[in-house]
Image (cartoon, grey):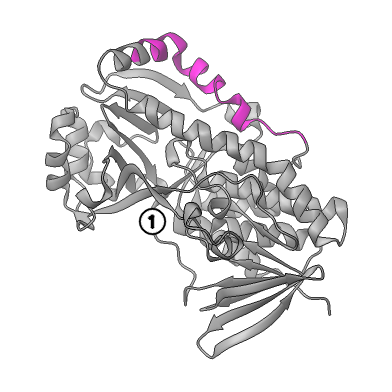
Amino acid sequence: MSAPLVIAGAGIGGLSAALALARAGRRVLLLERAPKIEEVGAGLQIAPNAGRILAGLGLEEELRAVALEPAAINVRRGHDGAVLARLDLAGTRARYGAPFRVYHRGDLQQVLLQAADDEPAIEIRTGARVGDFEDCDGAVRLRVHAGEGVEEIAAAGLVGADGQRSAVRGHLLPTERDAPVYSGLTAWRALVPAESAPAALRARESNLWMLTGAHVVHYPLRGGEIVNVVVIVATPRQDDQAAVLSLDGAALARALHGRRPAPMLSALIEAGAVWRHWPLFARPPLSRWSRGAVTLLGDAAHPMVPFLAQGAAQAIEDAEALGRAFLTLGASVETAFSAYEKSRIDRASRVVRASRRQGDYFHLGGLGAVGRDLAIRALGGRGMLARNDWLYRQPRGQSAT
C-alpha cells in the first residue's frame, strides 16, 4: 500500500484538506496533538467563497442543520449605535453561489470530523504530535510523538495545518525572524445568552460597531439561542494585559468606557459572564509555502487578523486548491504542492493585507472616523457588499458546486 499524505492538525483547515485529498483519490493520515478533537472558541463566520467549497464536499445538508444565516450585516457608529449601512444578505446565494453563514466553531468542526471519520481513505490519530522530519527522495520521514513514545512514519508528503504557531513551519523555517509577534491587538470573546442581550440586538443579523481604537462584532448562533460577541481593542503592549486571562462583563465595559461605547453596546458587553483574552499575533509573509514534499496550509502559511472574517475561509480555499492540484496533476507530490502554492499564495497574501487595512479602517478616530462614516453612508449596503466581490466570487479555477 502506498504511503499516505500526512496532515498535521485537525482544525477546520486540516479536516477540509483531508476530505479534499480523499476526494482526489489520496490516502490521508491526519495527526492531531490534542487527545480529543474538540474546538475551543465560539463563533465562526463562513462567507460564500468558503461555503461553496464546503457544499462541494457533499456536506450541504449537514451544514444547513448547524448553521445560521444572518439576514443582514449592520455597520454601526460605536458611540451612538447609528446604522451607517445595512448589508442585505438575502440575495447572496444567487450572487455568489452560497449564502453567508455563521456557526459555533465546534459544530462546524464536528460536521467535518464526522465526514472524515466516514471516509475510508482517511485515518485520524489523536494525541499525536509531529516532531522533526526529513524530506528526501520525493518522500518524507517524520517522527511522531505519542503516548507510547516516538514513532517514525514514512509519508508521501506532509501538510502543516497546525495553526499560527505551526511546528511544521518552525522546522521549515528555523529562524527567530519568523517567530510569531504580537500584533498590537487583543480580542475578548464571550457567548451571551440571547435573553440576557438587549432586545434590540437579538435579531438574526450580524452587527459591527466601530469605536476609536476598537471595534465589536456580534451575531446569533444555534438558532438564535446565544449571541457570539468579539471585542477587539488596540493594546500596543501585550504585557499590559498578559496576566489577565479573563474578565467579567462589568470589568470589560469599564475598560472600554474611555472609548465611549453606546449604552446598548455597553449593556451587551456587561451581559457576558466571562470574557476570554486572546492576544492576536502575526508572522512575516512567506514568499514560498513549500519545500519538496512538505507544504503549509491555513494559519501555518498565512496567519491573518480576523477583520475580514476570512481566517477559516482561506484555509478552506487552500484545502480545495490542494485537492484540485492532485486531481489535475496526478501522483507527483512535489509537483502538486508547487502548483497548489502557486495557485493560492497571491490571493491569500492579498487577503492578509486587506484584513489588516480593514482593522485600521474600523479603528479610526477624529476626523478620519467622520470621513469614514460619511463614505460608508454614501456607499450604502449594496456598495459595501460590492466592495468585496473580489473576495466572495468564485476565483478562476475553483471547482463549481
Decide which of 176, 238 is in the foreground and name it: 176
Q: Amino acid at mark 1?
A: Gly
Residue in the image at 77% along x and 71% along y: 136
Compared to residue 103, the image places residue 21 above or below, namely below
Q: Residues within 10 Å of mark 1 (few under 14, many from 20)?
A: some
Please indicate, yes or no, whether residue 10 appears anywhere in the rendered image: no
Whether residue 380 is in magenta: the answer is: yes
Whether residue 244 is in magenta: the answer is: no
Residue 340 placement, left or right of 379: right
Where the N terminus falls, by quadrant?
A: bottom right
- Residue 254 placement (x, y as % from top left): 11, 40
- Residue 344 placement (x, y as % from top left): 68, 42
Decide which of 144, 48 is in the foreground and name it: 144
Residue in the image at 45% along x and 29% along y: 357
Residue 92 placement, left or right of 3: left
Decide which of 286, 298 is in the foreground and name it: 286
User: Which residue does the numbered mark 1 point to in the structure image?
Assistant: 41
Q: Secondary structure at mark 1?
A: loop
- Residue 211 placement (x, y as % from top left): 26, 27
Where the C terminus falls, by quadrant?
A: top right
Quadrant for residue 160, please give it.
bottom right
Residue in the image at 61% along x and 54% along y: 297
Start-end of magenta stretch = 373-396
Compared to residue 178, the image places residue 73 above or below, namely above
Magenta region, main secondary structure: helix
